[in-house]
Amino acid sequence: MISFEEAELRVKIIKAMAHPVRLMIIDLLKDKELSFSKICEHFDLDKSTISKHLLVLKESGIVSSKKNQREVIYKLEIPCVLDFFECSTKVIKHNLLKHQKIMN
């Protein structure tokens, strides 16, 4: 069994991902590094809002950034978080199948 302290650390990471925009940013960065401006192109949100979401992801260690001339470039620091996406998709499919069986 994990310790309470380890559970708290895991919760911090899970909370960092627990927002649709942040999940979408992680998905955008799964195959490539992107500049802040390229990330912003995918959302109909203020740049300050996107910046705050990126900060949450950076503080949790999920993404990192570097300056490249005038742009800030973001990359997925720990790609294994994508395994969480795959697992959550399996849970969704399982729940749908279970619900369909109940309805039949």
Image (spheres, helix red, strand yellow):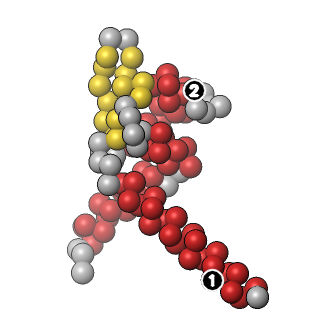
Which residue has dot 1 on it? 98
Image quadrant where one finds the N terminus: bottom left
Quadrant for residue 10, please give it: bottom left
Q: Seen from this angle, which residue lies furthest top?
A: 69
Going by the numbered disc 1, the residue's amino acid type is: Lys
Going by the numbered disc 2, the residue's amino acid type is: Glu
User: In percent of the image, x 68 and y 86: which residue is there?
Assistant: 101
Classify 48 as above or below 15.
Answer: above
| Image position, residue 74 (x, y; %) | 37, 31
| Image position, residue 32 (x, y; %) | 38, 34
Which residue has dot 2 on it? 41
The crowd level at tag 2 (other Cα within 10 Å; few <14, some 14-19, many 20+) is: few
Question: Can residue 104 be seen here?
Answer: yes
Question: Can residue 48 be seen here?
Answer: no
User: In percent of the image, x 29 and y 42: which residue is there?
Assistant: 77
| Image position, residue 37 (x, y; %) | 49, 22
User: In percent of the image, x 60 and y 77: which residue is there?
Assistant: 95
Residue 44 falls left or right of residue 67: right
Helix, strand or loop for disc 1: helix
Q: Earlier in the sequence, mark 1 or mark 2?
A: 2
